[in-house]
Image (cartoon, helix red, strand yellow):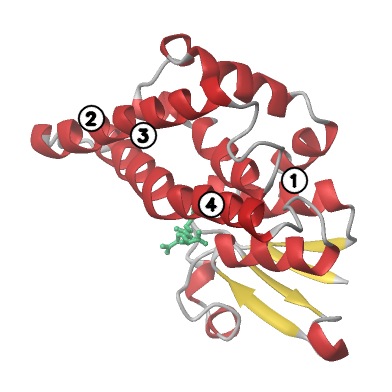
Amino acid sequence: MIQLYTWATPNGKKVSIMLEEIELPYEVHAINLGKGEQLKPDYLTINPNNKIPAIVDSDGPGGKPLTLFESGAILMYLAEKTGKLWPHDLRKRYEVIQWLMFQMGGVGPMFGQANYFFKLAEKVPYAIERFYKEALRLYRVLDKELARQEFLAGNYSIADIATYPWVGRREGHHVKLEEFPNVKRWFDAISARPAVKRGMEVPKK
Ligand SMILES: N[C@@H](CCC(=O)N[C@@H](CS)C(=O)NCC(=O)O)C(=O)O
């Protein structure tokens, strides 16, 4: 059984969507970030970086428990464990990893910063412009790629799962999908998946 430590944020939803897609049983532990539960000593033994998500797989490699943080690493582990949602072919698999890293190093941090500075009561125009422009540039990269193929690395994979919840927060960084028609087509297709709908509801309110 997998224990999932999460909260209602894009990085948390990546893992609940993945667990729903691969149909592995899991138990949810809501870590209330507003109350600072990520800073509690017990949780720091699971994620010393005091962030969600994290998992503990009681049936890890060699039948021993495995504790893991960083959403990208968790997605790769679950894909490896089940052989699902990334390709067996090494060349194709690295295309998936490439787009996963693009999300982890670009989409997540930049959309996150844009959301933060747009929301901040005391406006910092330089920061808003910097992160908004970079978010738009990343949407253009995504749109161009998704004009070429149905999903980010060809078939639906952990790269799409990682990117989807961040595009779901586009209101926060003032982006309209009508301006990125291929991202919109991709977003709507993923939104229609039953496992994605279930994963997006975790943790329950
Ligand atoms: N690179 C990390 C980022 C995780 C992250 O930023 N989590 C946020 C919520 S989306 C968090 O837990 N923040 C709480 C804090 O920083 O105290 C990952 O992808 O797992």
Query: Looking at numbered disc 4 in the image, what kind of residue is underneath it?
Result: Leu
Query: Looking at numbered disc 2 in the image, what kind of residue is underneath it?
Result: Lys
Quadrant position of residue 171: top left
Mark 4 in CB contact with mark 2 (< 8 angstroms): no
Disc assigned to residue 50: none
Q: What residue would you read off at disc 1?
A: 204
Q: What residue would you read off at disc 2?
A: 133
Mark 2 in CB contact with mark 3 (< 8 angstroms): no
Mark 2 in CB contact with mark 1 (< 8 angstroms): no
SS label for mark 1: loop
Disc assigned to residue 138: 3
SS label for mark 3: helix
* Disc with the residue nearer the chain's start (4 vs 3): 4
Q: Nearer the viewer, residue 2 or 179?
A: 179
Q: Residues within 10 Å of mark 3 (few under 14, many from 20)?
A: some
Query: Looking at numbered disc 3 in the image, what kind of residue is underneath it?
Result: Leu
* Disc with the residue nearer the chain's start (2 vs 1): 2
Could you tell me which quadrant the N terminus lies in? Answer: bottom right
Where is residue 15? Give x, y as percent.
Answer: 68, 55
Where is residue 134? Give x, y as percent.
Answer: 26, 35
* Disc with the residue nearer the chain's start (4 vs 2): 4
Which label sits in the foreground, 4 or 2? 4
Query: Looking at numbered disc 1 in the image, what kind of residue is underneath it?
Result: Lys
Q: What residue would you read off at disc 4?
A: 100
Q: Nearer the viewer, residue 184 or 121?
A: 184
